[in-house]
Amino acid sequence: MPVLRDFVAVFVVCASISLPAEAEVTTLTVGRTPTLSQLPIYVLQGENLVEKHARAAGLGELKVTYVDVAGGAVLNDMLLSGTMQIATGGVPPFLILWSRAAGSRSAVKAIAAVGGTPSTLYTRDPNVKSIRDLGPRDRIAVAGVKSSQVAILLQMAAADAFGEEAYAKLDPLTVALKDADAVAQMKSGKGELTCHFTYDPYRAAYAGDPAIHAILQSRDVLGGVGTVTVAYATSEFQSRNPKLVAAYFAALQEADQIIKSDPARAARDFKAYAKSAMPAAELEHLIQQPDAQYSVTPVAVSRIAAFMHRIGTIKAAPAGMKDLFFTEGNAAPGS
């Protein structure tokens, strides 16, 4: 029976070789919104960087689809439903989902920071010089009431101006509106809007307009430039696709380098895939402004999280970056 025994042994070895561990996905859907804080995601698409790094990781040919959506709530719904695998959204919507889904099968973490660009609160009322002058007749357009980055920044500014217990003082004045629609109303002088809290590339529409002026800058609230958008996924997806998530992180790092070394190239990618009407030269100027940062390292995320916890928007405050980011995102120190 030695021959039979040897045959069985060989069969077992061959069977184990021919049955690999569960393969990682071969298709990937990435969600985003068309703002310059998400510029690295447009560079990923324009330069096929995720596909490049997936091949380098031995994952073969990966098909990547990029989907533009209206805002953070839609991103979160699509992520949890499985219709997208990686979302790119504002820090507050991410933190809200992180808090709500903690400990469940839908738990999420961030892969990396994506970008940080300045936000500005504008008004068309010449009598309003600061948020202290805003009154019941004012209406402030924000991307999402009580949940978007600018809405949380407005609450933080109100807490600084009126006392932390009055953080929600300006919330009744806010209305959720697409930035393009808000710009149209503000520029026309018609409609109920008197203010717009927005970011690039929409801020450029107000530059040089004598009827509109700024009353608040995001750096006034954060004490500098902070991360605006992060890339995040469910923990279940990351555990099943660790090589792909690591490849995505590496692709983001390369995108950041391209933005720094060749901003004109990055501007062309954004213009092409965000379908921006802004001239490439103007986009390039915005990309190079001092208050724009594109890095996988988070900045001021913990400060925003701590504030959202204090006012009860999220149930728990993260103990550190490891609570919020997968291993890849902890490769560099962050805050």
Image: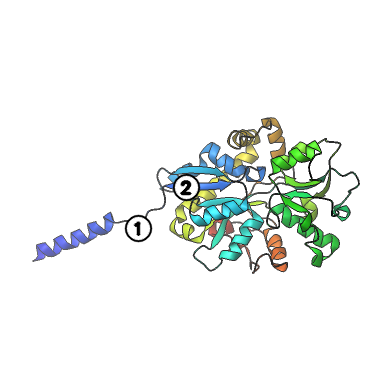
Q: Residue at x 48, y 43 (%)?
A: 64
Disc 2 crowd rating (10 Å Cα; few below 14, some 14-19, many 20+) is: some
Q: Quadrant of residue 329?
A: bottom right
- Locate residue 306 relative to residue 43 in the image: left or right: right
Q: Residue at x 65, y 65 (%)?
A: 314
Q: Nearer the viewer, mark 1 or mark 2?
A: 2
Q: Which residue is mark 2?
A: 28
Label 1 – label 2 distance at C-alpha: 19 Å
Q: Is residue 134 visible?
A: yes
Q: Is residue 288 visible?
A: no
Q: Amino acid at mark 2?
A: Leu
- Locate residue 170 relative to residue 264 in the image: left or right: right
Q: Which residue is mark 1?
A: 21
Q: Secondary structure at mark 2?
A: strand
Q: Secondary structure at mark 1?
A: loop
- Locate residue 182 relative to residue 244 in the image: left or right: right
**In the rendering, at what x and y percent does residue 96 appear?**
63, 61
Q: Nearer the viewer, residue 16 or 115?
A: 115
Q: Amino acid at mark 1?
A: Ala
